[in-house]
Image (cartoon, grey):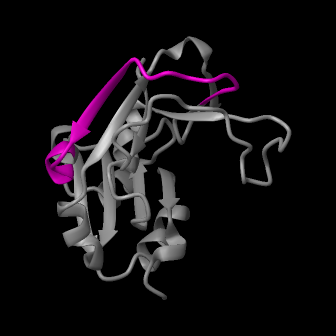
């Protein structure tokens, strides 16, 4: 297994635990967040880019596979709004890889791992062409004018899904 932090910042030397803003997590324990390699495509966009992502999980129905994927050779989809196309083309991301020893699984569907101790990356990778990075990872990419309809459908499906930065999405 490999774990990463994705950022537009190119020179992060150390990751200090931060108190989470989510209300469902303990506000007394600082965390360093990482994402596993399988869910990495969910984060290969500019930070504030609203997106709907989904992938096939163990409970995904055959009907949903046929409905939500255009090819049987892919199992992951990322959908962004058309207004983010230029930003997506012109953003460079940095992947900071961590030693996995201090991390524990926080959310299996999302692929989130957390550590309560300071982390120093063991490697850094620069990604200049985000669309190529997604294609290389066999991700189906879709571009639409509005995310809300597909978000509603995906939430009602048997897929594993993530809605990211929807506060920046076009109004419904």
Say above or below: 101 vs 29: above
Q: Is residue 3 left or right of residue 27?
A: left
Segment colored magenta: 114-133
The residue sitting at the bottom extreme is 172
Instruction: Give coordinates of residue 20: x percent, y percent.
Output: 72, 46
Q: Nearer the viewer, residue 110 or 122?
A: 122
Q: Residue at x 38, y 39 (%)?
A: 40
Q: Name the side, left or right, on which 96 lies relative to 137.
A: right
Q: Is residue 117 magenta?
A: yes
The total number of labels drawn is 0
Image position, residue 151 (x, y; %):
47, 69
Give the side of residue 67 with respect to residue 152, left or right: left
Q: Is residue 147 above or below residue 88?
A: below
Which is nearer the eye, 68 or 163? 163
Query: Visible in this render: residue 120?
Result: yes
Q: Residue furthest top?
A: 101
Q: Percent position (x, y) of residue 150?
A: 42, 72
Instruction: Please name whichever residue, 21 or 155, is drawn nearer the observer in this view of the structure.
Output: 21
Q: Identify which residue, 148 or 67, lies in the foreground.
A: 148
Quarter of the image with the N terminus is top left
Residue 143 lies, in percent from the top left, at: 25, 70
Residue drawn 32% across the image and 49% down it: 44
Q: Quadrant of residue 86?
A: bottom left
Whether residue 131 appears in magenta in the rendering, the answer is: yes
Q: Is residue 107 visible?
A: no
């Amino acid at each position: 297994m490999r774990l990463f932090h994705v950022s537009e910042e190119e020179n992060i030397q150390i990751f200090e635990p931060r108190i989470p803003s989510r209300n469902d997590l303990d506000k007394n324990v600082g965390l360093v967040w990482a994402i596993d390699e399988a869910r990495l495509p969910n984060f290969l966009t500019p930070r504030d880019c609203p997106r709907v992502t989904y992938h096939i999980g163990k409970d995904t129905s055959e009907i949903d596979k046929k409905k939500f994927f255009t090819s049987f050779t892919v199992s992951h989809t990322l959908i962004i709004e058309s207004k983010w196309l230029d930003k997506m083309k012109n953003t460079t991301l940095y992947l900071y890889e961590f030693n996995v020893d201090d991390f524990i699984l926080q959310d299996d569907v999302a692929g989130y791992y957390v550590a309560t101790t300071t982390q120093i990356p063991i490697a850094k990778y620069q990604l200049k062409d985000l669309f190529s990075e997604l294609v290389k990872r066999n991700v189906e990419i879709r571009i639409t004018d509005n995310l809300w309809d597909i978000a509603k459908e995906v939430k009602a499906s048997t897929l594993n899904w993530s809605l990211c930065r929807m506060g920046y999405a076009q109004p419904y």
